[in-house]
């Protein structure tokens, strides 16, 4: 999945909320899918887990 990045926002009991898009995309839609379908997709595409920096603190 070198051309795509997946950002998982929320993992529930059955569903996963995620964003899947190109690395420098301006707008990436939110998607919802079942855990099993996400697992199959990641295994099929030989996905690699990358460490990301924690989100920046919002200054007021």
Image (cartoon, grey):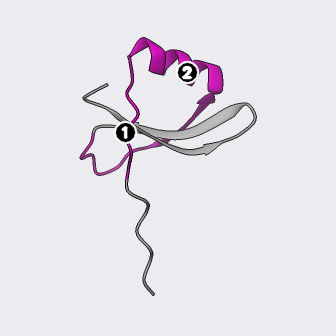
Badge 1: residue crowd in 10 Å (few <14, some 14–19, many ≥20): few
- Which of the 4 image quarters holds residue 3? top left
Image marks 2 and 1: residues in contact by CB distance under 8 Å: no
Q: Residue furthest top?
A: 44
Q: Is residue 34 magenta?
A: yes
Closest to the observer, 60 or 47: 47
Q: In which quadrant of the rendered image does the N terminus lie?
A: top left
Element under disc 2: helix
Closest to the observer, 53 or 7: 53
Q: Which residues are magenta?
A: 23-52
In the rendered image, residue 8, in percent from the top left (x then y), is placed at 51, 42
Compared across the picture, whether 9 is left or right of 25 comes to right
Q: Does residue 16 lie above or below 24 as drawn?
A: above
Which residue occupies 40% across, 68% down? 56
Which residue occupies 52% across, 40% down? 18
Q: Nearer the viewer, mark 2 or mark 1?
A: 1
Q: Which residue is mark 2?
A: 39
Which residue occupies 38% across, 16% down? 45
Residue 7 marker: none
The tag earlier along the polypeptide, 2 or 1, is 2
In the rendered image, residue 11, in percent from the top left (x then y), is placed at 64, 40
Element under disc 1: loop
Q: Residue furthest bottom?
A: 60
Marks 2/1: CA–CA distance: 16 Å
Compared across the picture, whether 58 is left or right of 1 comes to right
Compared across the picture, whether 38 is left or right of 21 comes to right
Q: Which residue is mark 1?
A: 50
In the rendered image, residue 4, in percent from the top left (x then y), is placed at 31, 32
Q: In which quadrant of the rendered image does the C terminus lie?
A: bottom left
């Amino acid at each position: 999945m070198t051309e795509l990045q997946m950002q998982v926002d929320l993992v529930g009991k059955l569903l996963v909320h995620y964003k899947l898009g190109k690395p420098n995309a301006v707008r990436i839609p939110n998607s919802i899918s079942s855990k099993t379908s996400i697992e199959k997709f990641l295994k099929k595409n030989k996905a690699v887990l990358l460490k990301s920096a924690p989100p920046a603190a919002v200054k007021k």
